[in-house]
Image: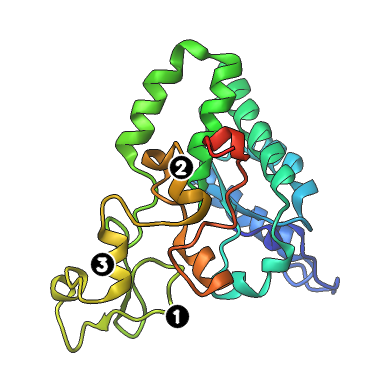
Amino acid sequence: MSASALTASAPRTTNSAASKGAFDLSLEGIRLCRDAGLKVGVRFTMTKDNFQDLPGLLKLVEDEGIDRFYFSHLNYAGRGNTNRRDDALHQMTRSAMDLLFDACREYQERGLNKEFTTGNNDADGVYLLTWLQARFPEKLEHIRKKLVQWGGNSSGVNVANIDNLGNVHPDTMWWHYNLGNLRQRSFGDIWLDVSDPLMAGLKAHPRKVGGRCGACAHFDICGGNTRVRAQQLTGDPWSEDPGCYLSDEEIGVA
Protein backbone atom coordinates (compact mmCIF):
# COMPACT_ATOMS: atom_id res chain seq x y z
CA MET A 1 0.00 0.00 0.00
CA SER A 2 1.49 3.31 -1.04
CA ALA A 3 1.78 6.47 1.01
CA SER A 4 -0.89 8.08 -1.13
CA ALA A 5 -3.31 5.31 -0.22
CA LEU A 6 -2.81 6.18 3.41
CA THR A 7 -3.36 9.90 3.05
CA ALA A 8 -5.86 10.43 0.23
CA SER A 9 -9.51 11.05 0.92
CA ALA A 10 -12.69 11.18 -1.20
CA PRO A 11 -15.77 13.40 -0.98
CA ARG A 12 -18.34 12.17 1.49
CA THR A 13 -21.66 10.84 0.15
CA THR A 14 -24.72 9.23 1.66
CA ASN A 15 -23.62 5.78 0.46
CA SER A 16 -21.75 4.05 3.31
CA ALA A 17 -19.06 2.53 1.07
CA ALA A 18 -18.61 5.61 -1.09
CA SER A 19 -18.42 7.81 2.00
CA LYS A 20 -15.11 6.26 2.92
CA GLY A 21 -11.90 7.74 1.59
CA ALA A 22 -8.94 5.79 0.25
CA PHE A 23 -7.33 5.66 3.69
CA ASP A 24 -10.43 4.20 5.35
CA LEU A 25 -10.96 1.63 2.60
CA SER A 26 -7.31 0.57 2.61
CA LEU A 27 -7.30 0.20 6.38
CA GLU A 28 -10.55 -1.78 6.23
CA GLY A 29 -8.92 -4.17 3.76
CA ILE A 30 -5.89 -4.58 6.00
CA ARG A 31 -8.10 -5.37 8.99
CA LEU A 32 -10.12 -7.94 7.05
CA CYS A 33 -6.95 -9.71 5.91
CA ARG A 34 -5.43 -9.55 9.38
CA ASP A 35 -8.55 -10.90 11.06
CA ALA A 36 -8.69 -13.73 8.51
CA GLY A 37 -5.21 -14.80 9.62
CA LEU A 38 -3.35 -13.48 6.60
CA LYS A 39 0.06 -11.89 6.93
CA VAL A 40 -0.26 -8.21 6.02
CA GLY A 41 2.13 -5.36 5.38
CA VAL A 42 2.25 -1.75 4.30
CA ARG A 43 4.67 -0.10 1.90
CA PHE A 44 5.90 3.48 2.00
CA THR A 45 7.93 5.26 -0.69
CA MET A 46 9.48 8.33 0.88
CA THR A 47 9.94 11.75 -0.71
CA LYS A 48 10.54 15.12 0.87
CA ASP A 49 6.78 15.74 0.62
CA ASN A 50 5.72 12.77 2.78
CA PHE A 51 8.75 12.43 5.08
CA GLN A 52 6.71 13.72 8.02
CA ASP A 53 4.24 10.82 7.66
CA LEU A 54 6.75 8.11 8.60
CA PRO A 55 6.32 8.22 12.42
CA GLY A 56 2.55 7.98 12.04
CA LEU A 57 2.85 5.00 9.71
CA LEU A 58 5.08 3.17 12.18
CA LYS A 59 2.50 3.83 14.90
CA LEU A 60 -0.19 2.45 12.58
CA VAL A 61 1.84 -0.73 12.12
CA GLU A 62 1.86 -1.25 15.88
CA ASP A 63 -1.70 -0.16 16.61
CA GLU A 64 -3.24 -2.32 13.87
CA GLY A 65 -1.12 -5.41 14.44
CA ILE A 66 0.44 -5.20 10.96
CA ASP A 67 3.16 -7.78 10.38
CA ARG A 68 5.50 -6.06 7.95
CA PHE A 69 6.65 -2.56 7.05
CA TYR A 70 8.41 -2.01 3.73
CA PHE A 71 10.32 1.24 3.34
CA SER A 72 11.05 2.00 -0.31
CA HIS A 73 13.50 4.62 -1.50
CA LEU A 74 12.35 6.51 -4.57
CA ASN A 75 13.71 5.00 -7.77
CA TYR A 76 13.83 7.12 -10.89
CA ALA A 77 11.87 4.76 -13.13
CA GLY A 78 8.34 4.76 -14.51
CA ARG A 79 6.14 7.06 -12.46
CA GLY A 80 8.97 7.46 -9.95
CA ASN A 81 11.03 9.23 -12.61
CA THR A 82 8.43 12.00 -12.82
CA ASN A 83 8.80 12.56 -9.06
CA ARG A 84 12.58 12.58 -8.81
CA ARG A 85 12.60 16.33 -8.05
CA ASP A 86 10.75 15.36 -4.88
CA ASP A 87 13.27 12.71 -3.86
CA ALA A 88 14.12 12.89 -0.17
CA LEU A 89 17.18 14.89 0.75
CA HIS A 90 20.05 12.82 2.05
CA GLN A 91 19.71 14.06 5.62
CA MET A 92 16.01 13.16 5.60
CA THR A 93 16.94 9.68 4.42
CA ARG A 94 19.47 9.25 7.22
CA SER A 95 16.91 10.40 9.78
CA ALA A 96 14.37 7.96 8.37
CA MET A 97 16.86 5.09 8.60
CA ASP A 98 17.67 5.97 12.21
CA LEU A 99 13.95 6.00 13.01
CA LEU A 100 13.42 2.60 11.35
CA PHE A 101 16.38 0.97 13.07
CA ASP A 102 15.37 2.38 16.44
CA ALA A 103 11.74 1.29 15.97
CA CYS A 104 12.81 -2.23 15.01
CA ARG A 105 15.04 -2.46 18.05
CA GLU A 106 12.29 -1.14 20.34
CA TYR A 107 9.73 -3.61 18.98
CA GLN A 108 12.14 -6.51 19.55
CA GLU A 109 12.81 -5.39 23.11
CA ARG A 110 9.06 -5.23 23.75
CA GLY A 111 8.46 -8.66 22.24
CA LEU A 112 6.61 -7.37 19.15
CA ASN A 113 7.30 -9.58 16.15
CA LYS A 114 7.52 -7.19 13.19
CA GLU A 115 9.40 -7.43 9.92
CA PHE A 116 11.15 -4.36 8.54
CA THR A 117 12.42 -4.20 4.97
CA THR A 118 14.09 -1.41 3.04
CA GLY A 119 14.41 -1.45 -0.73
CA ASN A 120 15.85 0.36 -3.75
CA ASN A 121 18.94 1.63 -1.97
CA ASP A 122 21.68 -0.83 -1.04
CA ALA A 123 23.51 1.91 0.84
CA ASP A 124 21.12 1.00 3.68
CA GLY A 125 23.33 -1.97 4.55
CA VAL A 126 26.39 0.23 4.95
CA TYR A 127 24.44 2.77 6.99
CA LEU A 128 23.23 -0.06 9.23
CA LEU A 129 26.87 -0.75 10.08
CA THR A 130 27.34 2.84 11.25
CA TRP A 131 24.24 2.47 13.42
CA LEU A 132 25.56 -0.79 14.87
CA GLN A 133 29.00 0.68 15.50
CA ALA A 134 27.46 3.23 17.88
CA ARG A 135 25.16 0.74 19.67
CA PHE A 136 26.23 -2.88 19.21
CA PRO A 137 29.89 -2.85 18.12
CA GLU A 138 30.28 -6.50 19.12
CA LYS A 139 27.82 -7.47 16.36
CA LEU A 140 29.46 -5.38 13.67
CA GLU A 141 31.68 -8.00 12.05
CA HIS A 142 29.00 -10.68 12.03
CA ILE A 143 26.48 -8.40 10.33
CA ARG A 144 29.06 -7.15 7.84
CA LYS A 145 29.79 -10.72 6.75
CA LYS A 146 26.07 -11.31 6.26
CA LEU A 147 25.76 -8.17 4.14
CA VAL A 148 28.74 -9.16 2.01
CA GLN A 149 27.18 -12.59 1.57
CA TRP A 150 23.99 -10.89 0.38
CA GLY A 151 26.03 -8.95 -2.17
CA GLY A 152 23.89 -5.86 -2.68
CA ASN A 153 22.04 -5.00 -5.85
CA SER A 154 21.20 -8.07 -7.95
CA SER A 155 19.28 -6.60 -10.88
CA GLY A 156 19.93 -8.71 -13.96
CA VAL A 157 21.39 -11.50 -11.82
CA ASN A 158 18.98 -12.79 -9.18
CA VAL A 159 16.12 -10.41 -9.98
CA ALA A 160 14.16 -10.33 -13.23
CA ASN A 161 10.90 -8.89 -14.49
CA ILE A 162 8.53 -10.16 -17.16
CA ASP A 163 5.82 -7.67 -18.06
CA ASN A 164 2.26 -8.35 -19.21
CA LEU A 165 3.37 -8.52 -22.86
CA GLY A 166 6.09 -11.08 -22.24
CA ASN A 167 8.95 -8.57 -22.43
CA VAL A 168 11.88 -9.35 -20.12
CA HIS A 169 13.59 -6.60 -18.10
CA PRO A 170 16.54 -6.61 -15.64
CA ASP A 171 14.10 -5.80 -12.83
CA THR A 172 10.80 -3.98 -12.29
CA MET A 173 12.49 -0.56 -12.52
CA TRP A 174 13.87 -1.20 -16.03
CA TRP A 175 10.61 -1.35 -18.00
CA HIS A 176 12.05 1.18 -20.44
CA TYR A 177 14.79 -1.35 -21.34
CA ASN A 178 13.66 -4.47 -23.18
CA LEU A 179 15.93 -7.53 -23.25
CA GLY A 180 13.65 -9.66 -25.44
CA ASN A 181 10.23 -11.24 -25.60
CA LEU A 182 9.22 -14.72 -24.46
CA ARG A 183 7.22 -15.24 -27.64
CA GLN A 184 10.44 -15.10 -29.66
CA ARG A 185 13.05 -16.58 -27.28
CA SER A 186 13.09 -18.64 -24.11
CA PHE A 187 13.67 -16.88 -20.81
CA GLY A 188 16.94 -18.75 -20.31
CA ASP A 189 18.28 -17.63 -23.69
CA ILE A 190 17.32 -14.03 -22.98
CA TRP A 191 18.60 -13.98 -19.41
CA LEU A 192 21.99 -15.52 -20.14
CA ASP A 193 22.68 -13.42 -23.23
CA VAL A 194 25.52 -11.09 -22.28
CA SER A 195 25.82 -9.72 -25.79
CA ASP A 196 23.43 -7.10 -24.45
CA PRO A 197 25.72 -4.41 -22.96
CA LEU A 198 23.51 -3.70 -19.97
CA MET A 199 23.22 -7.37 -19.02
CA ALA A 200 26.95 -7.87 -19.50
CA GLY A 201 27.60 -5.01 -17.10
CA LEU A 202 25.03 -6.12 -14.52
CA LYS A 203 26.36 -9.69 -14.50
CA ALA A 204 30.01 -8.61 -14.21
CA HIS A 205 31.52 -9.37 -10.81
CA PRO A 206 32.49 -6.92 -9.61
CA ARG A 207 30.54 -4.45 -11.70
CA LYS A 208 32.55 -1.71 -13.35
CA VAL A 209 31.02 1.38 -11.76
CA GLY A 210 32.57 4.84 -11.70
CA GLY A 211 32.56 7.86 -9.42
CA ARG A 212 32.06 7.52 -5.68
CA CYS A 213 30.47 4.09 -6.09
CA GLY A 214 33.51 2.67 -7.86
CA ALA A 215 35.86 3.98 -5.17
CA CYS A 216 33.64 2.99 -2.23
CA ALA A 217 35.27 0.88 0.48
CA HIS A 218 31.96 -0.96 0.94
CA PHE A 219 31.38 -1.90 -2.69
CA ASP A 220 31.25 -5.57 -1.67
CA ILE A 221 28.13 -4.78 0.39
CA CYS A 222 26.08 -2.66 -2.03
CA GLY A 223 27.42 -3.82 -5.40
CA GLY A 224 27.24 -0.32 -6.80
CA ASN A 225 23.69 0.28 -5.63
CA THR A 226 20.81 0.96 -8.04
CA ARG A 227 21.97 1.42 -11.63
CA VAL A 228 18.68 2.73 -12.99
CA ARG A 229 18.93 5.96 -10.95
CA ALA A 230 22.32 6.68 -12.48
CA GLN A 231 21.04 5.88 -15.96
CA GLN A 232 17.96 8.09 -15.63
CA LEU A 233 19.90 11.05 -14.27
CA THR A 234 23.07 10.93 -16.40
CA GLY A 235 22.33 8.57 -19.28
CA ASP A 236 25.19 6.35 -18.06
CA PRO A 237 24.13 3.27 -16.04
CA TRP A 238 27.68 2.89 -14.73
CA SER A 239 28.08 6.32 -13.16
CA GLU A 240 27.72 6.77 -9.40
CA ASP A 241 24.28 6.34 -7.87
CA PRO A 242 22.89 9.80 -7.02
CA GLY A 243 20.71 8.18 -4.35
CA CYS A 244 23.64 7.20 -2.12
CA TYR A 245 23.24 9.22 1.06
CA LEU A 246 26.52 8.21 2.70
CA SER A 247 29.28 10.78 3.19
CA ASP A 248 32.69 10.57 1.53
CA GLU A 249 34.20 9.83 4.92
CA GLU A 250 31.80 6.93 5.53
CA ILE A 251 32.64 5.25 2.25
CA GLY A 252 36.38 5.91 2.46
CA VAL A 253 36.81 8.32 -0.44
CA ALA A 254 37.46 11.51 1.51
Residue 162 in the image, given as x and y percentages of width and height: 32, 74
Q: How crowded is the residue under tag 3: few (<14 C-alpha within 10 Å), some, or many (20+)?
A: some
| Residue at 57% from the left image edge and 33% from the top image edge | 250
Q: What element carries label 2?
A: loop
Q: What element carries label 3?
A: helix
At label 3, the amino acid type is: Ala
Left or right of residue 244, residue 179 in this image? left
Q: From the image, which quarter does the C terminus lie in?
A: top right
Q: How crowded is the residue under tag 1: few (<14 C-alpha within 10 Å), some, or many (20+)?
A: few
At label 1, the amino acid type is: His
Vertical comparison of 50 with 169: above or below: above
Left or right of residue 144, residue 132 in this image? right
Residue where numbered disc 2 is placed: 37
Considering only order in the chain, which callout, 2 or 3, is on the residue closer to the N terminus?
Answer: 2
Residue 251 in the image, given as x and y percentages of width and height: 53, 37
**In this orientation, which residue lies closer to the viewer: 90 or 79?**
90
Vertical comparison of 206 with 176: above or below: above
Residue where numbered disc 3 is placed: 200
* Distance between mark 2 and mark 1 Cα atoms: 38 Å
**In this orientation, which residue lies closer to the viewer: 171 or 127?**
127
Residue where numbered disc 1 is placed: 176
Taking the image as drawn, is residue 46 in sight? yes
Q: Splitting the image into 4 quarters, where does residue 198 fall?
A: bottom left
